[in-house]
Amino acid sequence: MTSLMRKAWWWTADYAYAVYWQARSMSIWIKPQKYLSGAARPVVVIPGIYESWQFMRPLIDALHARGHPVHVVTMLQRNSRPVPAAARIVADYLAEHQLRNVVIVAHSKGGLIGKFVMLDLDTERRVEAMVAVCTPFSGSRYARYLVIPSLRAFSPRDMTTSRLSRDLATNTRITSVFGLFDPHIPEGSELAGARNIRLNLGGHFRIMGNPRTIQTVVEAVTDD
């Protein structure tokens, strides 16, 4: 019962966090150009599905404070496009801004987009590494029951998700950060061949604002 109660608490707190940041991202607008200064290696952030870039503000603020110029791909808007189409937008942004030695920092679907870029679209090796938080690298068995196609695409049977999960070579450049329990990804986010960091936390959204997650992501970006 203790375990069930803890998971119920994580689930409730997770959605409360998501609602808070979705509302905040619509009510408080910050120009992304604010984050472009810095002499450390560049970071490109990719949010999860239906998330604006501001949803990742806790990570963005921490990375920028450490001297990283943080790039926001505003063309993704709320990231509802299919993974290949979104990945093309990110790849075009990298080329247009002549970015190199890049670390992608992604949440959830953003990690699939980042891996697609690294696998198929980054012919000039602009991306050196990716740090992904709570990404369904092997899909989520819940997705097959969802009506909305953009969500059903996370099914392990989806062509793109399945293809990405079969690729192991790219995983050596990925750090996957996740908690003990993710209400959206029962399979978890452990990735074969990657650097996997499991935190003593729970949730899919709220984990991004936790100081331990923020520290872990900042250290991973610095180490990679």
Image: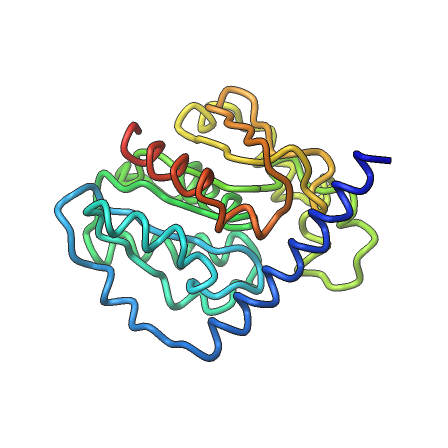
Name the side, left or right, on which 187 lies relative to 73: right
Who's the residue at 39% across and 38% down the image?
Answer: 217
Q: Is residue 80 left or right of residue 86?
A: right
Name of the residue lying farthest toward the right:
1
Q: Residue placed at 52% from the left, 24% from the top?
A: 168
Q: Quadrant of residue 221?
A: top left
Q: Residue at x 51, y 34 (%)?
A: 177
Residue 27 is left or right of residue 221, and the answer is right
Quarter of the image for the C terminus: give it.
top left
Residue in front for this viewpoint, 52 or 11: 11
Q: Residue furthest top?
A: 193
Q: Going by the picture, which residue comes out furthest to the left?
A: 39
From what the image shows, is residue 130 above or below residue 29? above
Counting from the top left corner in percent of width and height, residue 214 is at 41, 43
Q: Position of residue 90 (x, y in %)?
A: 38, 55
Determine the residue positioned at 47% across, 66% down: 52
